[in-house]
Amino acid sequence: MRYNSTILRQIIDLIRIRDFQASVSRYRGDWHGREYQSWDNLLTLLSVHIINIKSLRELETVLGVNALKLYHLGMKAHKRSTISDGIRRIDYRIYEKVFYETLERYQKLTADKRKKFRFKNPLKLMDSTVVNIGLGVVDWGRYAKSKGAIKLHYEYDLERDIPEFITITDKDVNDCTIGKNDCRMKPDSIYCFDRGYNDYEWFYSFEDKGAYFITRLKENADYKIIGQHKQISEKDKQKGLLYDLEIKLKGYVKDNRKKLRLVGYVDLETKIEYQFLTNNFELDAYTVTQIYKARWNIEIFFKWIKQNLKIKTFLGTNTNAILSQIWVAMLYFLCLSFVKYQTKYKNTLFYLHKIIKATLFHSRSLLEALSINYIEQKEVQLSLFDP
């Protein structure tokens, strides 16, 4: 790590430059730009998310004040009109592609991440969140012609606490539609989602792909009990388990001959009863309930990005500008998560984000800023990639 570089430089070093350049070439990001290019746009939008900049005028001021510290980043302080034009023009797919390439390397380097459950199956959470964008400000085009909102659909890796697949649609697109069309079912993986993804035929398709799902059964679901999967012990009853059954869904379902598992559970504090549906017959019944409870982690993620990143107000007014800002936000969250993992920072992402915000243009070691004690500096590599 270069200690004479700024914190922003150390964050940007987590992105492999040749991947970024390849993405720029693929989507001709600098085709019509001489002064303000894709690299400038990346650094500018990163600054927007980290510092929580609210307007182009404020952004112009911040960059201007720190102009002397920007040269080693390969950029300069641009005027707000230049930035506005660049955000609208430079293809958002550059940052989308870089996000997935960086994600792939992050996953490889964090393969030893400690699991939250004892089973070895990868655990994925699926959900979506609506972001209001304001019709009076944004010309959103095909995503929200008269609605003023978009929907971000996520597939979330619970073990690493990061999003690993994102789809952006109009707010009226049904979650189940995205699940059926975009869910990348991987063998042995467990996918957990709420009742918004209810589709019986899609449920049965998990078995064909060698994958598993856990969800809540809809209240009006029509099914037939064909037997008891496992008897509930007195110890399990004390945890809130009610029953563990094998069922078949009734009605028009192509593969309704296949059986599913229904686990009954009551929350001992609220006394609310729940029914969990799954095609996994190996997991302990109580583990099934706790997996669904862990789905709350993606709600925490939604709350965090909305409160700390600029994904509710936008500097640009067209589709490309909005998507660019969203993808750079996800790229920053990914880098933030890796910094926390690699430095073994014990506090929350919120405080890590605040430290980076306060020292963004400071020329000091990020490790020093985090007050991390280490024996040999060379052993701590804050980089996703080989030199």
Image (cartoon, helix red, strand yellow):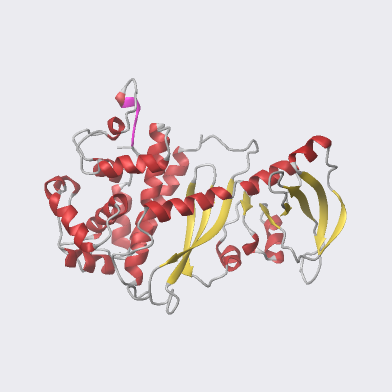
Residue 114: name its quadrant.
top right
Q: Position of residue 47 (x, y in %)?
A: 26, 52
Residue at image location 18% in from the left, 35% down from the top = 4
Q: Residue furthest left?
A: 68
* Residue 275 shown left or right of residue 159 in the figure: right
Residue 15: percent from left, percent from top: 32, 47
Closer to the camera in the image, 32 or 362: 362
Q: Residue at x 74, y 39 (%)?
A: 239
Q: For the C terminus, which image quadrant?
A: top left
Which sits in the foreground, 286 or 165? 286
The image quadrant that residue 145 belongs to is bottom left
In the picture as drawn, the residue positioned furthest to the top comes out as: 375
The N terminus: image quadrant: top left
Towards the viewer: 236 or 260: 236
Query: What main secondary structure does the magenta stretch of the protein show?
Result: loop
The reply to whether the magenta stretch includes residue 91 is: no
Q: Is residue 27 left or right of residue 285?
A: left
Q: Residue furthest bottom?
A: 146
Q: Please tell me which residue lies in front, 162 or 20.
A: 162
| Looking at the image, residue 253 lies above or below residue 94 | below
Q: Is residue 123 above or below residue 127?
A: above
Residue 7 is at least partly visible in this image: yes
Q: Residue at x 53, y 51 (%)?
A: 298
Q: x, y percentage for residue 3? A: 22, 33
Q: Which residues are magenta?
A: 378-382
Residue at screen point 37% across, 75% down: 135
